[in-house]
Image (cartoon, coloured by chain):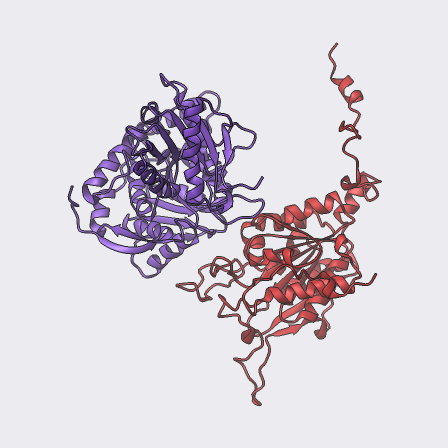
Chain colours: A purple, B red
Amino acid sequence: MKSVVKQERMALSGDEAVAYAVKQSDVDVVAAYPITPQTIIVERFSEYVANGEVQTEYICTESEHSALAACLAASVTGARTFTASASAGLALMHEMLFVTSGCRAPVVMAIANRALSAPLNIHGDHSDSMAQRDSGWIQLYAENAQEVYDSIIQAFRIAEDVDVLLPIMVGLDGFTLSHTLENVDTLPDDAVKQFVGSRKFPNVLTHEGKKAPFKLDPETPMTMGPIALPNYYFEFKRQQEEAMKNALSVIQKVNSEYAKISDRSYGNGLIEPYRLDDAEIAAVCLGSTAGTMKTIVDALREKGVKAGLLRLRTFRPLPIEDLRSALCNVKAVAVMDRCMSFGGHGGPVFHEIRNVLYDADVRPYVVNYIYGLGGRDTSPLELRSIYSDLQRIVAAKRVEKPIQYLGLRE
Amino acid sequence: MVLKPSDFRVPEVYADWCPGCGDFGIMNALQMAFAELGLEPHQIVLVSGIGCSGKEAHNVKCYGVHTLHGRTLPFAMGIKVANPNLEVLAIGGDGDGLGIGAGHFVNAGRRNLDMTYIIHNNGVYGLTKGQASPTLRLGVQTKSLPKPNINEAINSIGLAIISGFTFAARSYAYDVRHLKDTIKQAIQHKGLAFIDCLQPCPTYNNVTTKEWYAGEDRKDASGKPQPRLYKLEETGFDPVVHDWAEDFQKKMAALDKAREWGDRIPIGVFYKNELEPTFQDRLTSRIPFYMQRPPAKQKLCDENGFSTVDLSEFMKELKTS
């Protein structure tokens, strides 16, 4: 397949790739508060604003809670909005995350994934966004700076789709992606502008009985996010769930439409299987770890080991059917979590994968690896050992220790 | 045992602030003040927030708590209420205390706990590369700002007095002796004490620099710089409220002084009132044994891990049959 538009190769860190994608996506309002390792995103973007390269209202707030409040308010008036955060900043937004998804405001947020305090740590893991799993936001996790760039552009299309209208967060691993320079092929400004388009609004019935676009406008007054007591609240929540289900097909559609102009796609947009078709053993992971895992799979394949990988790109909504059909023929699956669910049975991704496979006709063995917390380096050798463990599990026909820690002193 | 300032150093921790950072001066002043007051490390708790100033708690030998952004005061208040016999100092940046944590700042004033709060005031968010902080004045353009600041600064001394802090002072990180004396007064003050500590940020604040504070840009006829900072105590300014009748007038005088900025910037004590009951006084009036048996000294459970609280009488009241 030939690339439809001519692209320019740039050297960008993950953070810079986000800022550049936002710059091209014709965003009306950006409100943010600095926090490592996200700061460079809004720092670069503020330079675009200062240089007059974008037509964006840029608001410096006094906290992340206020930053998201400002984005929400702008978004419900019909503005395209963006913010970025990480770690404690995202945690401080917790209350506003639910208000944003409940108001069906399609805010796009980049998360430079970072560990949570205490002890204080600025390095990468997925504890911050996993803790917001149930906040009603779509969650994508990118593998490299190229995907970060592509995903941010796609995020506006996904979030603003009238069948979805949900906020979305795009995760990029702190420092590993946020601060590392990579080659990124960028689309021309007009191609991005055309792809993203302008915001569309479904027509709703206002309390005055008029049909009007779903946004706050003095010409057609309406109420958003009002009080809904036991009589209606439940129905609102059910609608959000329906929107999440709709997002599954929208993400796939956006992924394939984006491929037509860029010649790049990420699996079907939901999951990215890698040498999985005839695999007997496979790992499931999110984010930048997949890059290293692919080279390990290649090396194992050369030795005749039928190893594969499934990278989960879309964690929310969870692509249940895709996951099940991709993994049901594998004999043993290792699920990798860069986050802990204290007191639970394994990490959050493990919960999902094991749950999904419960309904498979033949259930593969499933084992959980918790790794890389607080930026702990995970070496290729350690990752390689996961596949050796899987081979042993298949041979022994049982999982001895379902929850394992990788690269941990004990 | 009489301790020296050096006894409060933590040699095994490398203080990684930029060369010339005001935080070094504040660290030294804290260590000197603790030594001169005859305090020992186990009697002191330093509670810090997020930002460059957060590392003060790592670099002074005493109990240290490095908390969340903007939450220094709630942590410090909890510690002080649980154990009022500890000397509690909250330390944070201007963004920490007056931006994200401004709600806590105001509400701390309502309680008048007998503790000290020091704000590192350099006008910028140094750790995240120099964005404008809530103390940067309108129209000022520091290094990282593409345009002059669009927001007006918070008047921290004024806010402290209006919020109910019973001691409000300002000092300067490069005048370590003055800062040390101010910290000593703040610790000895009976009630909630606030120190607005001015400090240059040599990396990101290229406007209010040490040369600016020293008045190098305004020299007299003989070529001598005219420093901007002057000491209130040298002008005969009396900040102390001796009688409630003069409280309003003292507050107004302090607020008037707090408005001064530019070519003449006062440092020293602006306001001091020990007539207001502290939170400990208020608690003691309800719980007479509070100071002798504060929560930190109470047993939570017996040797078998069972609660020491007898709920049987209370449970009897809830019984329906």
Closer to us: A404 or A323: A404
Q: Quadrant of the C terminus of chain B?
A: top right
Q: Note whether B208 is above or below A286 in the view shown.
A: below
Closer to us: A238 or B15: B15
Q: Quadrant of the N terminus of chain B?
A: bottom right
On the question of residue A149 being in view, the answer is yes
**Rendered location of residue B170, percent (x, y):** 65, 65
> Residue drawn 35% across and 43% down?
A291
Q: Note whether B21 is above or below A3 in the view shown.
A: below
Report the side of A275 relative to A179 (left or right).
Answer: left
Residue A343 figure quarter: top right
Closer to us: A11 or B201: A11
> Residue drawn 50% across and 51% down?
A62
Q: Residue furthest top?
A: B321
Number of labels in the image equals 0
Q: Residue furthest bottom?
A: B222
Report the side of A318 relative to B280 (left or right).
Answer: left
> Residue drawn 48% across and 70% down?
B206
Residue A148 figure quarter: top left
Report the side of A213 relative to B212 (left or right).
Answer: left
**Rendered location of residue B247, percent (x, y):** 73, 58
Q: Note whether A85 is above or below A315 in the view shown.
A: below
**Rendered location of residue B43, percent (x, y):** 77, 53
**Rendered location of residue B248, percent (x, y):** 70, 58
On the question of residue A202 being in view, the answer is no
